């Protein structure tokens, strides 16, 4: 089991480049928000196909949602191969591109979606295709960053000797990329793509049915289906939607990702890995039908063909000694960065700060604090439950064989499909939304904690466990000396992912409805959802920026140091 | 006819700027070398002697800061056609089959597909890999993987074959099989190569395979001496002439060792902390002293004998011997190691007594240990950050060397109970946990 490893290469708390990246990203958010404000009105008359609650229509809706997912995946892959390659190959660009990626990871996509919807719809006024683009963009923003990170990291860690071999056998840059760097990166990239796809279902469902000001959108898809079902208080339809989603996720998992992961295992660089390689029935079928060899042979033939059309490489080693004079290009680059930063600052100052009263800013900060407390409390609650369960499961390989896929499956399941069930009871029993809506935020993200802890527990070396048995360690002492330290690094990784996801979930979890009854909790998520529904762009930008800053500060001051501490102290080599 | 030698290296130097930008670390200094047709030339030395750096310059993977390299009279400015390399860790691509790995180098040269097929299969056949064409590297043993490395290098029909410790990642038996196979092919002239450069730290391997051995010295890396091996192939390791040659190389290398250790103490007057310490565990130090003190050596041992008895390469053995010499537990000269009185006393002492002796020697003769202890004694809190010392060391050596030296110091200091170290806070102190 492979873990995603966040921030393995950005070690300082914050650098100058982080600050630059922050200004650029926030400036972009503000500028886009202000630019879209004027575009809202002409969109009022959008003809949308009405959504039918007939279960027979569900396969069609499911297919449409899936299609959006794959479209976004395609865009993410293109982004990964270009952006990450650029960042890895150019030391100058990398200084800026990597922190930008890191900051982008912290932008709560969902809150910002209403702005991007308006922006994309203005590109194709009056037509649904703009909304489609916006939905795909939203899913893209949820998938691309960690894929690009993974690829960047792989590119930077291609073993020196492999690079030298490629160089000394005169492989051209193009050949090296496709025959050395990409194969080396694929196992990690496939794993991250799988994680991204899991996260993506949440966003595709959320981005299909949206109300921005007077404009209501309902793209044909599972998300819109469930939105209509909630509006009409149709519990049976909600059941059908949940069922359809289950089927879709099982299909995509079995037909796409299990085969991919099993196939990519052969590319792993550590050649003497022990343990059974992953298997997949679908892969076996594809291999027997020669479908797979057709695809891979075709791919490599294309690579060879394109390589043979390019001129023979004449690699020259960079002359050692004083570096060639790059000061002019360095200066140009720096000037460009300064100009962009100035523009960003100007936008932030003129559009955001100038239009914000102190009271309003304080109120949004207060709301963000409430959401933060909620996230931390429920990550804590989830940890208390899932850490013991995960350790128990991880030490029993046969139980793990069933629970681990189930946990990964649950992480992929878009949790908001289950919200109506909870909200129904909150409405019926008149429960306090501020408390009872909160668990919804970690409903979909708690599974990351579970399956990371399971992975951690299963990787405790057998000899350590026997030693603990031999010394008769029991109860709390066993947990304190063996189980907790061993799973701690894995737990932190899971908790970071869960926490990030929960901030995004706040947007849908703090502001829900059942029929015409609104159920709202206090928090920045609800603030954003309300602003979005009212078409209040200033509110959206303010809320987004505030949430973004909170997430970044929490990451830098809490999660990241914790992660390094865990890696240093408790990683079993 | 081209009358230029296969390879000519003139006054090659390589240096890296220091991290603080002041001055530079010299890795390689004034190396001259000519390779003629039909020669196997060995570059022999300990790690850090710059022999791998030189090989990478010849391969065009790295360029020297001074001097020139030329291949058939043409300056080397990048990987030259006609020079191929075999890597220590094989560096074969795990996602390609044996055949694809071998064919890749020809594809890069735009050889026509039927020709690629013919030559790749011929190379696979020659190196003894037939039957494994469609296997993936992960299915192969280390020995077979390195054969792929050889086939891949030979298939491009290089004039010069560079080998970077090609057998050091293999077990003893496999390594010997590969060496013999390689020598057979070479002496029978069945390989399309005209010259070989072999980097190694294994003295016997060098004597077994090379026509000429260049012994490298460290700090800075340079050629110490050149030794010709005129024994006919196949050579017998037990042949007295062979043994005598191995012995004489040990003598050359240990003479240097003694000289260096002596010179080092004077190189940095004053504190004298600028010595790079190798990381040697106290178990190895005690173990070597016990071995030399006991039968059949009784205090004086022949280094080649010890090396083969303990199955240690010079890269492992020399640092131990050097550390013992630095602490006046032993003297190393003329290919022998001789325990001093204290070394013998240590070998025969009880654990507590051993620690007392060890601590005394450490504080008396290792300047860095003295220095750390003095700083700790002078401070009222008896605590000092690690960074305080690493900053100081980095004036004399690279960041990596400073870190390695401090790690070695911490390990020795802990064994001697001369001072304590808390990794969590990266601080030295005088408190030992009670």
Image (tube, coloured by chain):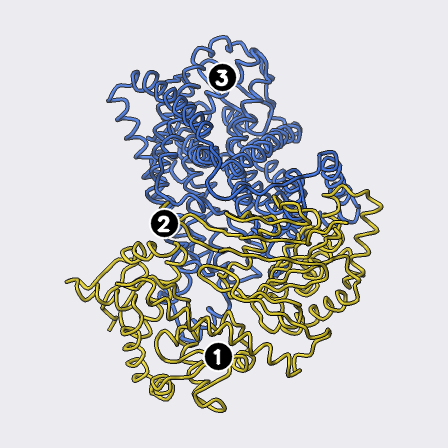
Q: Chain of mark 1?
A: B
Badge number at residue A24: none
Relative to A362, is A200 on the left or the right?
Answer: right
Specify few, some or many for label 1: CA neighbours under 10 Å numbering under 14, 14-19, or 20 or more: some
Q: Chain of mark 3?
A: A
Residue A423 visible somewhere in the drawing: no
For the C terminus of chain B, which image quadrant?
A: bottom left
Residue under the point 55% across and 58% down: B52
Q: Which residue is mark 3?
A: A118
Q: Which residue is mark 2?
A: A562
The disc, 2 or 3, on the residue closer to the chain's N-terminal end is 3
Specify few, some or many for label 3: CA neighbours under 10 Å numbering under 14, 14-19, or 20 or more: many
Q: Nearer the viewer, mark 3 or mark 1?
A: 1
Where residue A42 sits: x, y (%)? Answer: 50, 8
Residue under the point 64% across and 81% down: B241
Where residue A562 sits: x, y (%)? Answer: 36, 49
Q: Nearer the viewer, mark 2 or mark 3?
A: 2
Labels 2 and 3 touching (C-beta < 8 A): no
User: Would you identify the image quadrant in which residue A501 lies?
Assistant: top left
Question: Looking at this view, is A572 or A422 the one in front?
Answer: A572
Q: Which residue is mark 1?
A: B334
Where residue A475 sits: x, y (%)? Answer: 38, 67
Where residue B410 sits: x, y (%)? Answer: 33, 66
Q: Secondary structure at mark 3?
A: helix
Chain identifier for the blue-coloured part of the image: A
Q: What number of labels is visible?
A: 3
Residue under the point 56% across and 55% down: B54
Q: Colour of chain B?
A: yellow
Relative to A477, is A85 on the left or the right?
Answer: right
Relative to A309, is B245 on the left or the right?
Answer: left
């Amino acid at each position: 089991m492979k873990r995603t490893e966040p921030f393995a290469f950005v070690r300082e708390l914050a650098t100058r480049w982080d600050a630059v990246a922050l200004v650029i990203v926030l400036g972009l958010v503000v500028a886009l928000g202000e630019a879209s404000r004027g575009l809202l009105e002409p969109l009022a008359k959008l003809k949308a196909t009405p959504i039918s609650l007939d279960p027979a229509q569900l396969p069609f809706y499911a297919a449409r949602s899936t299609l959006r997912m794959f479209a976004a995946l395609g865009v993410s892959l293109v982004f990964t191969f270009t952006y990450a390659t650029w960042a890895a190959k150019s030391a100058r660009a990398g200084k800026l591109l990597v922190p930008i990626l890191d900051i982008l990871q912290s932008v709560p996509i969902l809150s910002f979606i209403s702005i991007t919807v308006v922006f994309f719809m203005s590109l194709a006024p009056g037509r649904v295709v703009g909304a489609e683009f916006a939905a795909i963009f939203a899913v893209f923003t949820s998938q691309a960053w960690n894929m690009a990170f993974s690829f960047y990291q792989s590119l930077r860690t291609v073993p020196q000797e492999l690079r030298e071999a490629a160089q000394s056998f005169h492989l051209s840059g193009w050949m090296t990329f496709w025959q050395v760097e990409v194969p080396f990166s694929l196992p990690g990239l496939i794993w991250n793509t799988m994680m991204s796809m899991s996260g993506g279902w949440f966003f595709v469902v959320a981005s299909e049915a949206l109300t921005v000001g007077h404009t209501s959108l309902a793209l044909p898809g599972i998300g819109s289906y469930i939105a209509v079902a909630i509006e009409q208080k149709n519990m049976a339809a909600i059941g059908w939607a949940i069922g359809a989603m289950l089927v879709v996720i099982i299909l995509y998992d079995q037909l796409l990702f299990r085969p991919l992961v099993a196939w990519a295992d052969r590319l792993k660089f550590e050649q003497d890995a022990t343990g059974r390689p992953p298997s997949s029935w679908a892969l076996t079928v594809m291999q027997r039908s020669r479908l797979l060899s057709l695809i891979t042979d075709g791919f490599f033939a294309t690579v060879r063909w394109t390589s043979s059309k390019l001129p023979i490489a004449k690699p020259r080693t960079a002359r050692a000694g004083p570096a060639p004079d790059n000061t002019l290009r360095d200066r140009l680059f720096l000037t460009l960065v300064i100009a962009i930063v100035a523009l960003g600052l100007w936008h932030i100052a003129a559009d955001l700060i100038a239009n914000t009263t102190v009271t309003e800013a304080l109120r949004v900060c207060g709301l963000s604090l409430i959401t933060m407390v909620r996230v931390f409390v429920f990550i804590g609650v989830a940890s208390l439950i899932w850490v013991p369960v995960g350790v128990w499961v991880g030490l029993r390989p046969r139980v793990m064989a069933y629970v681990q896929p189930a946990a990964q499956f649950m992480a992929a399941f878009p949790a908001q499909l289950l919200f109506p069930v909870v909200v129904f009871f909150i409405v019926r029993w008149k429960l306090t939304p501020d408390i009872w809506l909160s668990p919804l935020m970690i409903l979909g993200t708690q599974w990351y904690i579970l399956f990371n802890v399971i992975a951690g527990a299963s990787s405790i070396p057998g000899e350590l466990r026997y030693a603990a048995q031999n010394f008769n360690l029991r109860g709390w002492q066993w947990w304190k000396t063996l189980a907790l330290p061993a799973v701690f690094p894995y737990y932190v990784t899971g908790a970071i992912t869960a926490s990030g996801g929960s901030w995004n979930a706040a947007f849908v979890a703090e502001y829900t409805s059942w029929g015409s009854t609104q159920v709202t909790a206090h928090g920045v998520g609800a603030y954003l959802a309300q602003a979005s529904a009212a078409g209040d762009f200033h509110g959206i930008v303010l809320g987004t920026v505030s949430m973004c800053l909170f997430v970044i500060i929490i990451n830098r001051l809490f999660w990241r140091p914790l992660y390094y501490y865990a890696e240093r102290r408790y990683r079993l080599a | 006819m081209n009358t230029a030698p296969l390879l000519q290296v003139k006054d090659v130097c390589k240096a890296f700027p220091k991290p603080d930008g002041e001055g530079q670390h010299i890795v390689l200094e004034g190396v001259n070398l000519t390779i003629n047709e039909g020669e196997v030339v060995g570059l022999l030395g300990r790690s850090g002697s710059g022999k791998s750096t030189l090989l990478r310059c010849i391969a065009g993977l790295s360029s020297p800061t001074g001097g020139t390299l030329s291949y058939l009279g043409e300056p080397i400015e990048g990987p030259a056609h006609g020079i191929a390399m075999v890597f220590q860790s094989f560096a074969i691509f795990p996602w390609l089959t044996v055949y694809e790995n071998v064919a890749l180098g020809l594809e890069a040269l735009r050889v026509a597909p039927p020709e690629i097929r013919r030559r790749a299969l011929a190379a696979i056949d020659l190196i003894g890999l037939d039957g494994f064409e469609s296997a993936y590297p992960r299915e192969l043993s280390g020995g077979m993987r390195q054969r792929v490395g050889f086939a891949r290098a030979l298939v491009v029909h290089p004039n010069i074959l560079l080998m970077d410790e090609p057998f050091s990642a293999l077990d003893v038996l496999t390594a010997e099989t590969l060496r013999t196979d390689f020598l057979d092919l070479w002496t029978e002239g069945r390989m399309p190569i005209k010259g070989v450069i072999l980097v190694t730290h294994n003295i016997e391997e060098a004597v077994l395979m090379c026509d000429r051995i260049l012994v490298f010295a460290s700090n800075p890396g340079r050629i110490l001496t050149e030794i010709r091996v005129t024994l006919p192939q196949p050579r017998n390791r037990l042949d007295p002439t062979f043994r005598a040659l191995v012995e004489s190389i040990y003598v050359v290398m240990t003479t240097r060792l003694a000289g260096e250790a002596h010179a080092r103490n004077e190189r940095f007057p004053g504190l004298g902390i600028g010595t790079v310490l190798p990381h040697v565990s106290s178990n190895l130090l005690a173990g070597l002293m016990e071995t030399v003190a006991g039968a059949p050596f009784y205090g004086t041992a022949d280094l080649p004998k010890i090396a083969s008895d303990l199955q240690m390469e010079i890269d492992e053995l020399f640092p131990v011997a050097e550390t013992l010499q630095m602490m006046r537990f032993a003297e190393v000269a003329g290919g022998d190691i001789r325990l001093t009185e204290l070394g013998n006393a240590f070998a025969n002492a009880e654990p507590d007594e051993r620690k007392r002796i060890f601590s005394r020697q450490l504080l008396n003769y290792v300047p860095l240990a003295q220095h750390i202890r003095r700083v700790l004694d002078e401070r009222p809190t008896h605590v000092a950050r690690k960074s305080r010392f690493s900053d100081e060391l980095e004036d004399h050596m690279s960041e990596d060397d400073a870190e390695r030296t401090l790690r070695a110091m911490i390990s020795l200091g802990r064994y001697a109970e001369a001072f304590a170290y808390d990794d969590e806070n990266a601080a030295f102190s005088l408190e030992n946990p009670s």
